């Protein structure tokens, strides 16, 4: 049986929940806050509530919407590493089967693509995601703009040695399993 809990999540994240005094500076700067069901301040509030809010945190859509930009961490007057908390919450969500269907589809496509090419291929990611999630025309309005301004590449790009990326990903997965 899995022994993952809020206490173990915070240990792995190396964050003390009580370092957060709920000022909200992190959420005010987060580019994804308006789309999240829990913003960064609320995520930290969950961690302070402990086991009672563990399921709420790992079942949230927010942990999958976070882009990992680190703005919240940089803005925090107490140096609370929220992206680290979110990363560990993702591990737990996967292990406990709490990841939502669309988030899982996106996550699987993104990681497979990264393992194969060593880079994120936004155009392919969007195309395959739309097909698999049966939402074919999602974001289609922005395609001409992105192509015109070369914001995405039509042809896939590969780094020199994608195997190095996939090895690193495997190692981090092992680390996530070991650090329960
Ligand atoms: S900025 Fe830091 S102290 Fe303020 S709510 Fe966010 S995590 Fe907590
Ligand atoms: S790392 Fe995630 S939670 Fe923090 S500001 Fe960026 S998107 Fe928001």
Image (spheres, rainbow, N blue to C red):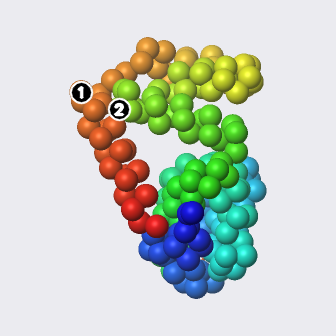
Q: Which residue is mark 2?
A: 118
Q: Nearer the viewer, residue 39 or 166?
A: 166
Q: Is residue 58 above or below residue 135?
A: below
Q: Characterize the local packing of mark 1: few (<14), some (14-19) or many (20 or more) Cα atoms within 10 angstroms.
A: few
Looking at the picture, tell me which residue is in the foreground, 9 or 153.
9
Q: Where in the figure is residue 104, as x and y percent of width and height?
A: 62, 40
* Disc 2 crowd, CA 10 A, few/some/many (<14, 14-19, 20+): many
Disc 2 on helix, strand or loop? loop
User: Residue tagged by mark 1?
Assistant: 160
Q: Please identify the residue farthest to the front as the structure is shown.
A: 1
Residue 94: x and y in percent read: 58, 50
Taking the image as drawn, is residue 161 in sight?
A: yes
Viewer-proximal residue among 167 and 23: 167
Is the shortest distance between ligand 2 and the CB of mark 2 under 8 Å?
Answer: no
Q: Is residue 1 left or right of residue 53?
A: left
Residue at image position (70%, 56%) is 59
Is label 1 in a helix, a strand or a loop?
loop
Q: Is residue 129 above or below residue 62?
A: above
Splitting the image into 4 quarters, where does residue 125 fall?
A: top right
Give the residue displayed 37% in from the left and 44% down from the top. Answer: 169
Q: Can you give x and y, in whole percent of width and height, for residue 5 in the image? A: 59, 71
Compared to 112, does 46 lie above or below? below
Is 123 positioned to the left or the right of 53 in the image?
left
Residue at 60% in and 67% down? 26
């Amino acid at each position: 049986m899995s022994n993952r809990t809020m206490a173990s999540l915070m240990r792995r994240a190396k964050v003390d929940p009580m370092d957060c005094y709920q000022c909200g500076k992190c959420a005010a700067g987060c580019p994804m806050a308006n789309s999240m069901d829990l913003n960064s301040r609320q995520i930290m509030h969950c961690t302070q509530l402990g086991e009672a809010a563990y399921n709420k945190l790992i079942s949230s859509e927010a942990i999958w919407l976070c882009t990992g930009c680190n703005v919240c961490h940089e803005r925090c007057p107490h140096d609370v590493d929220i992206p680290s908390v979110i990363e560990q919450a993702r591990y737990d969500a996967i292990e406990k089967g709490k990841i939502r269907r669309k988030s899982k589809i996106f996550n699987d496509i993104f990681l497979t693509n990264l393992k194969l090419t060593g880079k994120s291929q936004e155009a392919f990611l969007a195309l395959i995601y739309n097909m698999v999630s049966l939402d074919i025309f999602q974001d289609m309005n922005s395609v001409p703009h992105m192509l015109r301004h070369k914001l995405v590449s039509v042809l896939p790009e590969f780094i020199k040695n994608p195997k190095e990326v996939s090895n690193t990903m495997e190692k981090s997965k092992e680390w996530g399993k070991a650090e329960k």
